[in-house]
Image: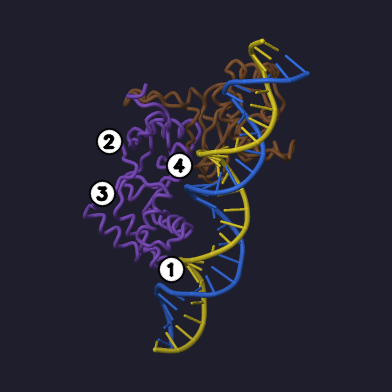
Chain colours: A brown, B purple, C blue, D yellow
DNA sequence: GACGTTGTTGCAACACGTTGCAGCAAGACC
DNA sequence: GGTCTTGCTGCAACGTGTTGCAACAACGTC
């Protein structure tokens, strides 16, 4: 239950390497292409853990290659989301927020006052999911849930 | 538990009239001013029920007065939110979404497929609020919660 | 290695919202 | 009605993300 450092890069774990290595093939299987621009974004993502905003990713790509075009990054992110490699939600300010290689489906908790963020685990989310499922037959997409409020420390 | 028509204007109820009428005085009490631009936005809001996006409100104001400036509208909305007259959240696409004269605190449910929206009542939200309160001492701002998923009809 | 398909890119324009700042005007006071 | 204070407006520039379109290039095939 640690806070989620927003720009939270860290080293890849070994089982992630396989995931990143397979991206090229997964694209090709679908008739999609492996371009230098996609390679660059995947390289950036593979050095990222936790959450990043779209703008962050654009900036990091630009550090590697200043000619990076934002729309290409956003379009590539859409593709990678279809492959399940990233997921996106919206931060408390409505900005795009991507999480990379989600181990398990989880939601997000944001403190309005201090800005800290936490993950809502699947277990904690279960009661939310169950409530809405029972009452309305609604299938909650937990990974897209962002709940805003005030954390213990700020109250 | 009716769906929330997104552009959902309808007539004001009588007890709302008092609320709208008092806006001027509530501003003045705080040393704030009652300007033609604010009058215009309040007029638009008073003919609105349910949910509107910021862009919607700008457009409706412009219908009344084509010289309306967006930043003024957004700044006025911030002020009105402080007075509790509107509340804002973020739609499934991250856009600003205002609800007018909230009768009771409530969250929102959006179907990813058909785009329909429902309100999560305070009672339904109670389990969400209670879970996070107990587990983390986190005070959920239900009115800012938007949950995305798939509704019964779309599954 | 050359060729053709067609998925992608780069670019320009747009949409929505925010911010900084100089000048204006609401409203209090005389 | 005139004056003063300071909250508000209008404007311009920016930040983030999306979209349409023509030209380009990945990659399967010969």
Residue under label 4, please give it.
B90
Q: Label 1, secondary structure: give it.
A: loop
For marks 3 and 4, the one nearer the N-term is 3
Residue B140 horizontal side relative to residue B122, left or right: right
Q: Nearer the viewer, residue D15 or A103?
A: D15
Give the Cα distance between marks 4 and 1. 30 Å
Does dot 2 land on a helix, a strand or a loop?
Answer: loop
CA neighbours of label 4 inside 10 A, class few (<14), some (14 to 19), many (20+): many
Q: Residue under label 1, please give it.
A: B31
Contact (Cβ within 8 Å) of mark 1 with mark 3 = no
Q: Which label was assigned to residue B10? A: 3
Question: Do the residues indicated by labels 4 and 2 lie within the same chain of the protein?
Answer: yes
Whole-Å distance between the Cαs marked 1 and 2?
39 Å
The secondary structure type at the circle numbered 4 is strand
Are the numbered discs 4 and 1 placed on the same chain, yes or no? yes
Residue B68 is left or right of residue D23, and the answer is left
């Amino acid at each position: 239950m640690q806070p989620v450092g927003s720009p939270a890069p860290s080293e890849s774990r070994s089982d992630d390497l396989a995931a990143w290595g397979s991206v090229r093939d997964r694209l090709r299987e679908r008739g999609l292409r492996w371009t230098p621009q996609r390679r660059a974004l995947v390289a950036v993502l593979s050095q990222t853990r936790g959450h990043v905003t779209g703008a962050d990713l654009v900036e990091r790509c630009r550090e590697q290659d200043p000619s990076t075009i934002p729309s290409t990054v956003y379009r590539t992110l859409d593709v990678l989301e279809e492959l399940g490699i990233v997921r996106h939600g919206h931060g408390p300010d409505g900005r795009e927020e991507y999480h990379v290689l989600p181990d398990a489906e989880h939601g997000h908790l944001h403190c309005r006052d201090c800005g800290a963020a936490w993950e809502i685990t699947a277990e904690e989310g279960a009661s939310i999911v169950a409530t809405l499922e029972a009452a309305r037959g609604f299938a909650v997409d937990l990974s897209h849930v962002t709940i805003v409020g005030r954390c213990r420390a700020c109250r």
